[in-house]
Amino acid sequence: MTTSGPVLRIAYLYPDLMNLYADRGNVTCLERRCAWRGVTPKVQRLEWNDRLAGTSDLYVIGGGQDRQQQLASEGLTTRNADQILSDLGDGAAMLAVCGGYQLMAHRYRAADGSELAGLGVFDAETLHPGSDVPRCIGNVVCDWKGSRLVGFENHGGRTYLGSTSVPLAQVVRGHGNNSEDGTEGAVAGSAIGTYLHGSVLPKNPHLADHIIRSALARAAPDFNLAPLDDADEWAAHRAALRVAGLR
């Protein structure tokens, strides 16, 4: 493992609050795939009461339950929104999963009717239909850029994209954003929101590299990622397809 090339600044938002279903593994995956190519990943872990220390090239946030989302919403909107939005506007990339995805949209209305403010990165909102409505749970397979993404979802809220939003992928198996319109996730610039847990990146190496390339377009635009031997990663991908009943 060599780390002699450019530095990629990664801000990991609220790892102690937002880490359902192994979402922490996304950061580990990004670190490893960078370092194997000579890119030095510099990870800043942002705890709840912290303010971001300077600019970042890539933001990562995972999922959390309603109480954890409430705390994360407070930290984002009162202390760190300006820095995050400024960086994203300047070309920084983002991976926001499940509850983190919801907090990067306009708002999340919980089952009890309370609302959490989001940052508006994605033109979308999430509405929880109530505790008596079944959650969106299970294995997910989606079509994305001529390939497939695999993962696991577990969310009560239904996310609806606005007129300026672009979905990340189209659902082949599973619920996706809302179990109604066949969309999964959202894309805004170099920011990606998704409901795919698992963690999602280790078994979707093409998505991981897409995110790294997007971040490097800001951090080191002339740097080219070398290919990796992803035999194990693709074996995990195929296993997830089989678990979902597909090949």
Image: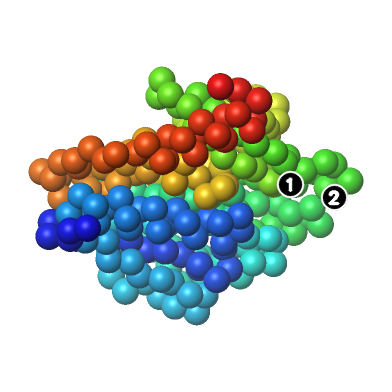
Task: Decide if residue 119 is in sight here.
Answer: no
Residue pictured at 50% horizontal, 68% vertical = 14
**Which of marks 2 and 1 precedes in the sequence?**
2
Left or right: 62 as drawn, with respect to 214: right
Q: Amino acid at mark 2?
A: Ser
Which element type, helix, strand or loop, lies under badge 1? Answer: loop
**Quadrant housing the N terminus:** bottom left
Residue 139 place in picture, x, y as percent: 65, 36
Residue 191 place in picture, x, y as percent: 40, 44
Question: Residue 126 sits in which quadrant?
Answer: top right
Left or right: 224 as drawn, with respect to 35: left
Residue 227 place in picture, x, y as percent: 23, 38
Query: Disc number at residue 5?
Result: none
Q: Is residue 157 above or below residue 242?
A: below
| Residue 74 or residue 22, whichever sits in front | 22
Q: Are marks 1 and 2 in contact (CB under 8 Å)?
A: yes
Question: Residue 31 sits in which quadrant?
Answer: bottom left
Residue pictured at 43% horizontal, 71% vertical = 46
**Quadrant housing the C terminus:** top right
Q: Amino acid at mark 1?
A: Gly
Residue pictured at 55% horizontal, 71% vertical = 16
> What residue did someone put label 1 on?
156
Badge 2 crowding class, 10 Å Cα cut-off, few under 14, some 14 to 19, many 20 or more, is few
Left or right: 5 as drawn, with respect to 203: left
Query: Disc number at residue 131?
Result: 2
Q: Residue furthest right?
A: 132
Badge 1 crowding class, 10 Å Cα cut-off, few under 14, some 14 to 19, many 20 or more, is many
Residue pictured at 77% horizontal, 43% vertical = 135
Which element type, helix, strand or loop, lies under badge 2? Answer: loop
Spatial CA span between label 1 and label 2: 8 Å
